[in-house]
Image: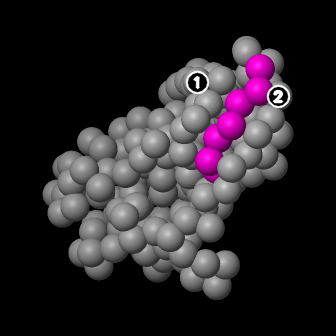
Amino acid sequence: MEISITVNGSEARHDVEPRTLLVHHIREALGLTGTNVGCDTSSCGACTVHLDGEAVKSCTVLAVQADGCTLTTIEGLAPSEEELHPMQQAFREQHGLQCGFCTPGMVMAATSLLDEVPEPTETQVREGLEGNLCRCTGYHNIVQAVLAAAKSGGGGTTVAVQQ
Ligand code: FES
Ligand code: FES
């Protein structure tokens, strides 16, 4: 089936098999390998992207279901190549990552969280990110990063200028 998705601001048309998962389409056809596959079973959140503005685990969506949608991946979050998104900057400053494998999914989930709850409590951050697993950090610095981004007022997606 031919599908058309607006990916990080540009239209991308591809022929896909109906069984192709969106995460595989993103990595293999679109070449955007910032979106990771951790579990393939909707448990880890490493594959989180924004589909029509909502955070989704892209291993739970078929590529054909994204036909006609707007997709933002971690590669499309920063305002420019020289500048990090405020959420990425906060992860950097607060040491919210170690190996980095979970980080794209965490950042996508966290920006979506701040769209819904711009000034979350620590508990709301922990609950909002409970679908995203990290095997390195113990979560503390991730939570601090999200709180810092919220405090800066720029951690949601609305400030992002897509490429
Ligand atoms: S790879 Fe999608 S939730 Fe783990
Ligand atoms: S930083 Fe390694 S899995 Fe989160």
Q: Secondary structure at mark 1?
A: helix
Q: Dot 2: within a 10 Å radius of its alpha carbon, few (fewer than 14), some, or many (20 or more) residues? A: few
| Closer to us: 69 or 140 | 69
Instruction: Residue 81: name its quadrant.
Output: bottom right
Give residue 44's position: percent from left, percent from top.
Answer: 53, 34
Q: Amino acid at mark 2?
A: Asp
Q: Residue at x 76, y 40 (%)?
A: 13
Along the line of sight, the residue nearer the viewer: 66 or 36: 66
Tell me the quarter of the image containing the N terminus. top right
Q: On screen, 155 above or below 3? A: below
User: In this view of the protein, can residue 145 be seen by the observer?
Assistant: no
Dot 2: element: strand
Q: Amino acid at mark 1?
A: Gln
Looking at the picture, how far across and down is residue 4, in whole percent? 68, 37
Q: Which residue is mark 1?
A: 65
In this view of the protein, can residue 2 be seen by the observer? yes
Check disc 2 and report the residue beneath it: 15
Q: Which mark is residue 108?
A: none
Q: Main secondary structure of the magenta part?
A: strand
Q: Earlier in the sequence, mark 1 or mark 2?
A: 2
Residue 20 occupies which quadrant of the picture?
Answer: top right
Q: Answer with the quarter of the image where residue 151 lies.
A: bottom left
Cβ of mark 1 under 8 A from ligand 1: no
Q: Position of residue 12 (x, y in %)?
A: 73, 46
Position of 123 relative to 93 (above/below): above
Span shown in magenta: 1-7
Q: Nearer the viewer, residue 30 or 84?
A: 30
- Density class for disc 1 (Cα within 10 Å; few <14, some 14-19, many ≥20) is few
Residue reaching furthest to the bottom? 82
Q: Residue 55: x percent and y percent?
A: 44, 42
